[in-house]
Image: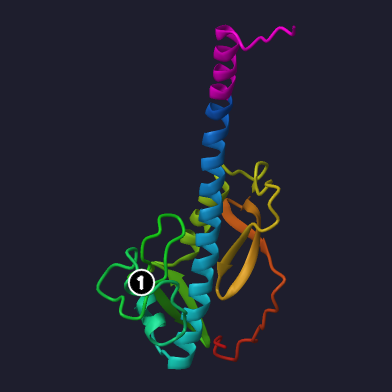
């Protein structure tokens, strides 16, 4: 006759404790990874919206800086809706054409503002911008925040050292990859590279293009 034996109470408690430790370690990591993925999705979505906004400004031949909203791009078919107006997450005053949703919190992005800046013959879209809000200093500060820079000196630049090859920044209608921020002659300078083709127009005699 074979002896049948089960788990003792001590063994069961040990297994439960091990599972608890694993969950304590794994769950926060999963949540953090999901948050980073959603933030990257949001960044990609904003870049797509900015491209649409620049096309919109170019087609409308704006001759001065103009603020529009995401819902304007939906209404004029520069963006495709992600959900219908009857979706519970599609809320606000301008949802008749559906909504674009924020992947981080599933809220409507329809009322988000975009500044279309007119610079010579170029149209530059700035997310949540206001008149005169974009400057060289703003860009440097944005990159420093993105790279979590500390004190930058001539001998101590703030370099991008992550493993993700898609460390990019959409600026002036071009997709740039950030190398780092350097202190050159007391001034903080961003070093960025791009695979995009850049058209450069030589200035005329008056110094304008």
Magenta stretch, main secondary structure class: helix
Would residue 97 appear left or right of 200 to someone viewing this image?
left
| Residue 144 showing in the rendered view | no
Is residue 154 rendered magenta in the image? no
Camera-side residue: 18 or 178?
18
Please give the name of the residue rendered at 55% of the width and 74% of the height, measured from the top-left corner: 172
Camera-side residue: 5 or 178?
5
Q: Position of residue 127 (x, y in %)?
A: 43, 68
SS at mark 1? loop
Q: Position of residue 18 (x, y in %)?
A: 59, 19
Q: Position of residue 167 (x, y in %)?
A: 64, 57
Please give the name of the residue rendered at 33% of the width and 74% of the height, measured from the top-left corner: 85
| Residue 203 showing in the rendered view | yes
Total labels: the figure holds: 1
Quadrant containing the C terminus in the rendered view: bottom right
Q: Quadrant of residue 105?
A: bottom left
Is residue 2 rendered magenta in the image? yes
Picture layout, residue 201 above or below residue 91: below
Please give the name of the residue rendered at 49% of the width and 74% of the height, measured from the top-left corner: 50
Pointer 1: what residue? 110
Picture layout, residue 193 above or below residue 48: above
Would residue 162 appear left or right of 48 to someone viewing this image?
right
Region of the chain picked out in magenta, as a range: 1-21
């Amino acid at each position: 006759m074979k002896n049948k034996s089960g788990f003792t109470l001590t063994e069961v408690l040990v297994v439960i404790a091990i599972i608890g430790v694993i969950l304590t370690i794994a769950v926060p990591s999963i949540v953090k990874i999901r948050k980073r993925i959603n933030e990257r999705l949001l960044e990609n979505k904003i870049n797509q919206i900015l491209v649409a906004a620049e096309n919109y400004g170019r087609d409308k031949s704006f001759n001065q800086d103009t603020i529009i909203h995401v819902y304007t791009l939906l209404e004029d078919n520069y963006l495709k809706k992600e959900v219908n107006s009857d979706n519970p997450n599609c809320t606000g005053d301008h949802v008749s054409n559906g909504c674009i949703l924020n992947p981080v919190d599933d809220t409507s992005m329809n009322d988000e503002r975009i500044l279309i800046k007119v610079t010579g013959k170029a149209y530059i879209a700035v997310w949540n911008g206001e008149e005169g809000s974009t400057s060289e200093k703003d860009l440097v500060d944005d990159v420093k925040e993105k790279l979590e820079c500390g004190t930058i000196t001539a001998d101590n630049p703030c370099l991008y050292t992550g493993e993700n090859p898609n460390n990019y920044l959409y600026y002036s209608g071009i997709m740039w990859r950030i190398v780092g921020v350097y202190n050159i002659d007391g001034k903080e300078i961003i070093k960025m590279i791009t695979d995009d083709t850049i058209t450069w127009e030589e200035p005329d005699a008056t110094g304008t293009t």
